[in-house]
Amino acid sequence: MNCDICKDSGKCKNNEKSKDYDEFYSDYWDCVEYVELMEGKQKGSTMISWIKSTMDKNKDYESDFSLWSKRYN
Ligand SMILES: [Zn+2]
C-alpha cells in the first residue's frame, strides 16, 4: 500500500506500512522529506523555504510588534 499523500513506494515515513511510521509523529512533512530524497534535494530544504516565506509574509506584523515592544521596554 502506498502513502496517500506522496504516492511513495513504501519508503515514506508517513506510510502506515513503513517501519518508521509513527502514529503520533508521522505527518505530511515525512512526505515532503520523502519527495526531497527522491528529487535529490537537501533534507529539510522545503521546510526551511516554507518557514522563510511565512516569515516574509509576517514582516509587517513583526516590525509593528517590535515598535510596540520598544515603547514598553
Ligand atoms: Zn507520504
Image (spheres, rainbow, N blue to C red):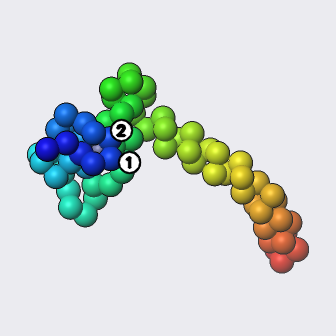
Residue 46: x, y in percent? Answer: 49, 38
Q: Which residue does the numbered mark 1 point to in the structure image?
A: 29
| Ligand 1 within 8 angstroms of badge 2 C-beta | no
Q: Which residue does the numbered mark 2 point to in the structure image?
A: 33
Look at label 2 and name its amino acid.
Glu
Q: Contact (CB < 8 A) between labels 1 and 2?
A: yes
SS class, disc 2: helix
Task: Give the quadrant of residue 3.
Answer: top left
SS class, disc 1: helix
Q: Callout 2: few (<14), some (14-19), or many (20+) C-alpha neighbours within 10 Å?
A: many
Instruction: Give the residue at x 62% y 44%.
Output: 52
Instruction: Give the residue at x 36% y 51%.
Output: 28
Residue 20 at least partly seen: no
Instruction: Give the residue at x 42% y 28%.
Output: 42
Quadrant containing the C terminus in the rendered view: bottom right
Residue 65: x, y in percent? Answer: 78, 67
Instruction: Give the residue at x 76% y 60%.
Output: 62
Estimate the spatial distance between the alpha carbons at disc 1 and disc 2, rounded to whole Å.
6 Å
The disc label shown at residue 70, or none = none
Residue 10 at least partly seen: yes
Quadrant containing the N terminus in the rendered view: top left
